[in-house]
Image (cartoon, rainbow, N blue to C red):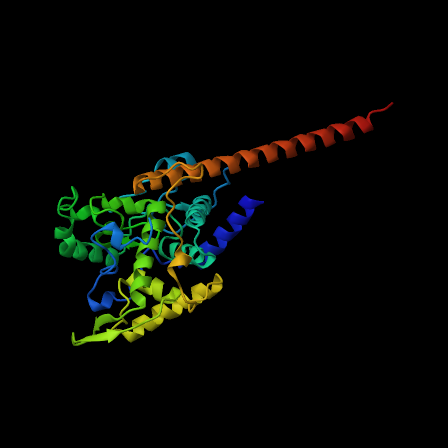
Amino acid sequence: MRLVQLTALAYCIGFLTDVFDDGASAKMDEADGTSPGRHIAADNLDDAVSAPAPLMPIRVDRDPEGSFIDDRAAVQALLPHACVHGVNDKRPKLTRNEQVRTHRVIAHVAKRLKASDEFHKLLQLVAARESSLQQGLVHRLSPDLEGSYSAWRKMQKTYEGNPHAADPSVWQTYGLFGMNSNYFTLVWDKAADPRILCDAIVDVLVYRRAAARMIRKAGGNIVCKDEQGKPFNYTTKATWETVHRAVSGGKLCPSKYEETAATMKRFFRGRAHKVGLNPDQPVTLKMLGVEPDKGLDGTPWTDQDQLLTGLWSEFEAAQANDEAELLAAETARAERVKTRVAARAARKQPR
């Protein structure tokens, strides 16, 4: 029953996804000449963190030029830490089975964070919009490619010492939430391979850290610039709409292009209401949860690599347990049917 419910939920989320969207980020302020995520990245993690049974696949055609991934074991072998295609490769096809798996990954991490139901809904909503719940994406729309290269030119010196710093081809926009790696890699680890953002669990953790930073800033005075470049003071409240706009667009300041901002706002509010999320609800840091520092068995996680490995291990164990229960239920059901058939046959035998 649990798997059936998850399948139905994933279908509903997938239905809300715009077919024409190839995982492009919601670029609220791209017209300003600034790339999304510009003010999100911190120079160290302390500034960004508040505290430390397979289904039959249903083919979902999001890119007619792609190819299907039908082998579930092959898909699992890509995780964690890997993208499902390169920047010059076509986006793979997506199965409903993989969407269900992604939904469950997000749900597991949200539960371990002890995050609110509202934050869980936001994560699912943004992942559905940006990636159709497909893990490991390299976002290849022209605005993503252009924005990534522009950001690399600005941010290259920031990553001095990173072995990938001089290679613009790896500093792309990745993952469930369409994160520009030039700005979001810092939120995870300044020395990391930017392709770490293809990892679904990293995506959730980084999104949470970025959202937490925006919530902290929302209550104070924010210095913004008008169309002429003149600074002015700005104050805003942390709501789900504000958090989403700030993380996706890279800043809390109002957009200089009101028409574009109004359109993006209307789209988000409509999608939020459909999944039962009030975009105007005040948001606190507590609602985002806290990153766990130990496993379910009590084993301490002393760094974020252990956190990542531990969360994936827990998720895969839960998957295996659910599939074993499903198999056992199906086997028991088959035995009951076999017994009833044998009983009917015996009653029909002449005495």
Q: Residue at x 33, y 38 (%)?
A: 306
Relative to residue 185, is residue 267 depicted above or below? Answer: below
Q: Quadrant of residue 83?
A: top left
Q: Residue furthest right?
A: 351
Q: Is residue 152 left or right of residue 86?
A: left
Q: Position of residue 86 (x, y in %)?
A: 26, 44
Q: Quadrant of residue 33?
A: bottom left
Relative to residue 210, is residue 331 depicted above or below? Answer: above
Q: Is residue 82 visible?
A: no
Q: Is residue 237 left or right of residue 297?
A: left
Q: Residue furthest top?
A: 351
Q: Quadrant of residue 325?
A: top right
Relative to residue 245, is residue 127 depicted above or below? Answer: above
Which quarter of the image is occupied by the N terminus?
A: top right
Question: Tag count in the figure?
Answer: 0
Q: Nearer the viewer, residue 14 or 65?
A: 14
Q: Is residue 216 visible?
A: yes
Q: Position of residue 311 (x, y in %)?
A: 39, 41
Q: Residue at x 51, y 35 (%)?
A: 321
Q: Position of residue 26 (x, y in %)?
A: 32, 61
Q: Residue at x 43, y 40 (%)?
A: 315
Which quarter of the image is occupied by the C terminus?
A: top right
Q: Nearer the viewer, residue 135 or 80?
A: 80
Q: Is residue 147 left or right of residue 5?
A: left
